[in-house]
Each structure stands twice: as structure tokens, then as C-alpha cells.
Amino acid sequence: MTEPLIEDVSHAPLFFVEELSGTTVSLGPQDARHLAMVRRARPGDVVRVADGRGTLATVRITSVSDNQVVADVERSEFVEPSPLDVCVYQALPKGTKADLVIQKLTEIGVQRVVMFAAQRSVPEWDQRRSASAVDRWSAIAMEAAKQSNRIRLPAIEGLWDARKVAEDLSSSEVKLAAHAASGRRLRDALGSKMPPSVALIIGPEGGLTDDELGLFSESGAMSVSFGSPILRTETAALAGATMILYHYERLG
């Protein structure tokens, strides 16, 4: 059973293009096949197209094929970024867990995700594999953004080492490192006034080492715990980011 396109613009399907300018827009083969085969799109149907950087356009389809959809831009707007910029530095987990982390953090509204190789990370990646993985993670983030109606795409970066993470922490006002043995709860580390940016570092299975915690502490990061449960690394990333966004009323 196909999903009909809805004239209500707020419920119209969302797609992404690299550039959004001019009076017409073209969607490539993957999106065209989805519109033609799954949604049975026809000329006259309305969809939304974004550039991932804040520009959103309502467009009306003029032609449909399996390889390309062309549409006229009816109106466009610029969507302001969230006043709270959350960056999650995720230690590389095993298997495909990184895919899940990227997907879920995109859905809840995290602006940036950086994968890094911690001392206890099991996978060992070379530069070529890292570049391929970032491309895949970016594609996963885009699909998650479409599903969750997110106009701005998160920045996906990696694969870094812990020292580069420590150097990059200066870009965030509040800096947190998840550590199960910390005597400071995450909620106690968050002030009542929303900062412009929060960085959250999540270690691998087994946690961050003392050397890594010391390195991050020298860069201004406070170690925090999420309470009594010991969470898997992919769970900790989602739980921690959700608590930050909820605390500052960006979720819920």
C-alpha cells in the first residue's frame, strides 16, 4: 500500500539537495525512485526540499521519472538554528553500533557527532576505512533527518583520536565526560541558564581510561555519571544527549 502525498505542507515528504537556489529543483535517482515507486508521485504534488543548512523550500512537482524528479519552487524560508548546540564525541563502538548512534542522535536534534578512537575501542581503522565510514554515517544522518522532519543536518566527523577531541573541546562552553564512577551527576553539572553549546564525551565499552579522563579534564571537561545503571556506550550517547536537551527544554 502506498503512502499518498499530502497537500498540507507541514506533512509533505522532506528531501535534501546540496544546493537550493533558483526557481526549480531536481531530485536524483534514489529520491526519484522513492517518489515514483513508493509514493506514486504525480505532477502537481507538493514536497519539501532542504539544503541541510537551514534553507527550506516548498516545491510542486512538474515531472516524475525513475531517475529524476523536477519541481518548481513555490516558496522558501530560512530556519534559524537551535539556540543550544550539542556535540557528542562518541568513542568508536563495535560492529554497526555507530550507525545506531548516528541515527538516534540525529533524530533527537544533536547538531554534531564526532567519532573517535579511544584506548579501549576494539575496532582498528585506517584512514581509508574512516573516510568511507563518515560517508556512510552522513547518509544515515540524512535518512534519519528525513524521517524526523529535521531541516538542518548534523555535522558528522571522524575518525579522531582522544588528543584531537581534547583540543576541539574549546569550541563548547560546557564540557562533560561520561564516567560511571564520577560523584557528579549529569543533571548537577547543568546550570539553570542554557549555554550556547554543550559537549558530551562518551567512552567505549569499559569506559574512558584515567589518562583520557585526565586529558579531557585539562581541557575543561567535568566527569559526570548518569546514575546507578551501567549503560552500553550506544545507550549512554542517546541517554546523555536526551537528558541535556530535556534539561534545557529542547525536548519534551
Image (cartoon, grey):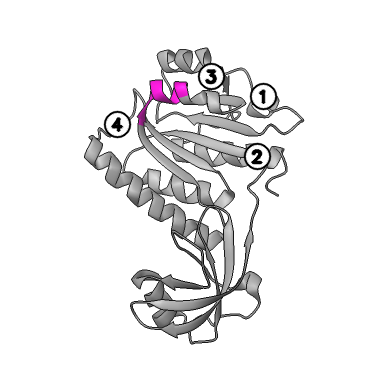
**Which residue is at 50% across, 81% downward?**
61
Residue type at tag 4: Val
The CA distance from mark 1 to mark 4 is 30 Å
Comparing 51 with 37, the one in front is: 51
SS for callout 3: loop
Question: How far apart are labels 2 and 1 at the CA level?
Answer: 16 Å
Seen from the viewer's position, the closer of residues 139 and 183 is: 139
Residue 231, compared with residue 212, is above or below; it is below
Residue 181: mark: 3
Residue type marked 1: Ala
Disc 2 + disc 4, Cβ < 8 Å: no
**Location of mark 4 (residue):** 122
The reply to whether discs 3 and 2 touch (Cβ–Cβ < 8 Å) is no
Q: Secondary structure at mark 1?
A: helix
Above or below — where is 118 with respect to 60?
above
> Residue 223 appears at what percent x and percent y?
56, 20
Q: Magenta residues, as a range?
A: 160-167
Image depth: mark 2 or mark 1 in front = 2
Question: What residue is disc 1 on?
Answer: 189
Numbered badge on residue 84 = 2
Is any part of residue 178 visible from this angle?
Answer: no
Of marks 2 and 4, the one in the foreground = 2
Reading the chain from its start, which is encountered first: label 3 or label 2? 2
Going from N to C along the chain, the mark reached first, 2 or 1, is 2
What type is the residue that disc 3 sits on?
A: Ala
* Residue type highlighted by circle 2: Leu
User: Is mark 2 in CB contact (under 8 Å) with mark 1?
Assistant: no
First in sequence: mark 1 vs mark 3: 3
Instruction: Find the distance from the CA under tag 3 to the CA under tag 4.
Output: 22 Å
